[in-house]
Image (tube, rainbow, N blue to C red):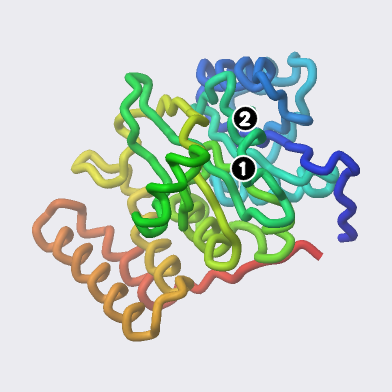
Amino acid sequence: MMVELSENNESVAAVVVSFSREEDIKKVIHNLKNQTRKPDEIIVIFQGTNPRILEWLNQQSGIIVHQQANLGSAGGFSNGFKMAIAKGHHWTWMLDDDAVPELNALEEMTSCKYFDSTQTGFLSSVVVKPDGQVYMSPVPDEANKWYGSVLQDGCVPVIVSSWIGCLVSSKSILDFGLPMEEFFTYDEDVELTSRIARSRACYCVIRSIIVHYQNPNANPFTSKVDMLKHGYYVRNHFATIRLSDKTYIKKVVRIWLWFFKNASEIITGKVPLKTIVPLFSGLLFFRPKIKYLE
């Protein structure tokens, strides 16, 4: 498709992917509408089946609601990028329906000196639990680079980030492609942001805060795992390693280390035997491809 970005040189569309969190989505929309620097547009990708959430969303003024089948976070944000870019926005601010931005979160990013969609790949926020504990920070570049940067302008050069509160330039999506929808969930954010950061400078704005009200039982790394999600994570991590910029030897080593780590968890009973299916699927068959906007 032909893409014409708006004359507003740095317009921002906030994209929220919503599934089933009825109370949390209300907090997210409230705080988006009351940002000290408001998004130029708010787009909600609704992938759930709860009619109360959809009804509430449709009653809200000032937001666009797009309903679709559940395509996971990868498919949800992929369509969110398509909508934001088709509407001419220079940036897409990505949020889950349990990720509540503090009221100055967007202003902190847009006032950052790296807020330049022609030069910067993405800007990310610091993600905290409701008690304020930081737990999902982007991965910084070399320590000797970021220490001085924090002191000077409150930004940390990063090489990978989660979706939550990530502000991605449209130019990066046009140049480097969309999220891989085949991932569905887990590691799709790592793959996309590392893909962008390999070619373009990216930063975490440390005063931009997102409060994540994640279900404590949603962690795929605990003994009480959701096995479907755990399977996605195991499978997708193989693809993330393959698509990295590591040398061939390093990729092979990391792939086999990942394989044996997960195989040992199956043998010791930490995870059920059926996890062997995504393990071998990821190792042998899963080959997602990058799609580009045309």
Rendered image: mark on residue 261: none
Q: Judge left or right: residue 17 versus residue 216.
A: right
Taking depth in this image into account, of 76 and 37 the one nearest to the observer is 37
In this picture, is 18 found above or below 84? above
Rendered image: mark on residue 167: 1
- The amino acid pointed to by label 2 is Leu
- Whether residue 26 is visible: yes
Residue 99: give x, y in percent of width and height.
50, 29
Q: Judge left or right: residue 74 versus residue 129.
A: right
Residue 230: give x, y in percent of width and height.
33, 51
Q: Which residue is mark 2?
A: 106
**What is the total number of numbered labels drawn onto the structure image?**
2
Labels 2 and 1: the sequence-earlier one: 2
- Whether residue 180 is visible: no
Question: Judging from the image, what secondary structure is the residue with disc 1 in?
Answer: strand
Q: Are marks 2 and 1 in contact (CB under 8 Å)?
A: yes
Q: Quadrant of the C terminus?
A: bottom right
- The amino acid pointed to by label 1 is Leu
Residue at 21 percent across and 59 percent down: it is: 273
Q: Residue furthest left?
A: 268
Taking depth in this image into account, of 228 and 31 the one nearest to the observer is 31
In this picture, is 198 found above or below 168? below
